[in-house]
Image: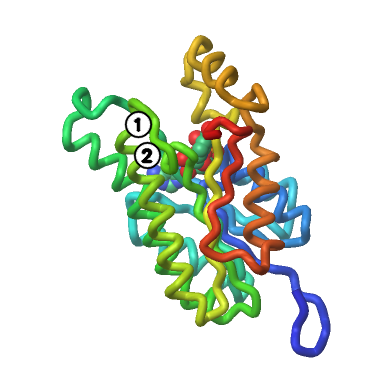
Amino acid sequence: MRRMDGSEVNRVALVSGGSRGIGAAVTSGLAERGCRVGCTYRTGFAEAEKLAVRHPEQVVPVRFDLSDPETATTAVNDVVSRWGRLDSLILNAGQWAGGRLTGTSPDSWWRVIDSNLRGTVDLARAALPYLATSPAPSIVLVSSVVGLIGHAGDTAYAAAKSAMVGFGRSLAKEVARDGIRVNILAPGFVTTDMTDAVPLSSRKRIEDATILGRFGTVDEMAKAAIFLSEDATFCTGSVLTADGGWAL
Ligand SMILES: NC(=O)c1ccc[n+]([C@@H]2O[C@H](COP(=O)([O-])OP(=O)(O)OC[C@H]3O[C@@H](n4cnc5c(N)ncnc54)[C@H](OP(=O)(O)O)[C@@H]3O)[C@@H](O)[C@H]2O)c1
């Protein structure tokens, strides 16, 4: 990114859920491109710290809990007070919890919605004033292909991920006047801690239903997220599906 005087300035990003899985790969990928990255952790400080050690001066661990609105404000403030700006926000932190509607209590059903959606919205809200002062700001929301086509046993998780699409596309319309692009990544099944719980027989069924015949990798998701965040300068309100053709 260039300053008015033509000199280069490294972008500053905040990646929620940056301590593990897809978020950790996004954090590394952005750092390798020269970005400075606030990488959020909730329980995984040690993992976030490892990324900071691997990319000294470029990655800083920042605490953020989806269920604690105050941490949304402090996470954004930590990054801005360190580097004086914010150019990219990657809203990746999320939690999977399954169960058929009839087998889930109302409280636990709504907890899944709340734990995925509330903190995501809080973090976007806290970041917007700073993003609005960046010359090339962007937001990427990490939804899920399950939020686009549905999945039995996932009504709450899918509803939360679907809401992220509606939220992101509406926000894109609201903030275009500030030059902020908002795009959505919808991953299919990706090998991370989150999908470790998938039993081998179900994993095989999913792989068989996936045109490319396998789960995706965190690096593949990171490339897609970074494309939307940094390179896709004529995309806003877009939903990029990265699912190996599972939803076809
Ligand atoms: N893996 C898949 O197949 C898949 C498919 C579609 C969409 N996704 C979405 O992609 C995103 C990343 O998934 P992943 O597979 O990389 O997950 P993961 O390996 O389980 O990592 C989850 C990350 O989110 C953070 N996190 C979890 N709950 C949080 C909370 N309540 N507050 C703040 N941070 C929290 C974790 O932080 P700590 O470890 O520090 O607690 C961790 O950094 C999620 O939004 C997920 O829904 C994943």
Residue 174 percent across, percent down from the top left: 43, 74
Q: Residues within 10 Å of mark 2 (few under 14, many from 20)?
A: many
Q: Residues within 10 Å of mark 1 (few under 14, many from 20)?
A: some
Label 1 sits on what residue type? Asp
The C terminus - image quarter: top right
- Extreme residue in the front direction: 248
- Extreme residue in the left direction: 106
Q: CA distance from mark 2 to mark 1?
A: 6 Å
Label 2 sits on what residue type? Ala
The N terminus - image quarter: bottom right
Q: Secondary structure at mark 2?
A: helix
Q: Secondary structure at mark 1?
A: loop
Q: Looking at mark 2, is its residue's CB closer than 8 Å to ligand 1? A: no
Q: Which residue is mark 1?
A: 154
Q: Viewed as shown, does residue 92 lie left or right of 51?
A: left
Q: Residue at x 56, y 30 (%)?
A: 246
Q: Looking at mark 1, is its residue's CB closer than 8 Å to ligand 1? A: no
The image quarter containing residue 152 is: top left
Q: Residue at x 37, y 39 (%)?
A: 158
Residue 106 percent across, percent down from the top left: 17, 36
Residue 70 appearing in the image: yes
* Contact check, label 2 and label 1, Cβ < 8 Å: yes
- Extreme residue in the right direction: 7
Q: Which residue is mark 2?
A: 158
Q: Viewed as shown, does residue 198 lie left or right of 25?
A: left
For the residue pair 7 and 146, the one nearer the viewer reads as 146
Residue 46 appearing in the image: no
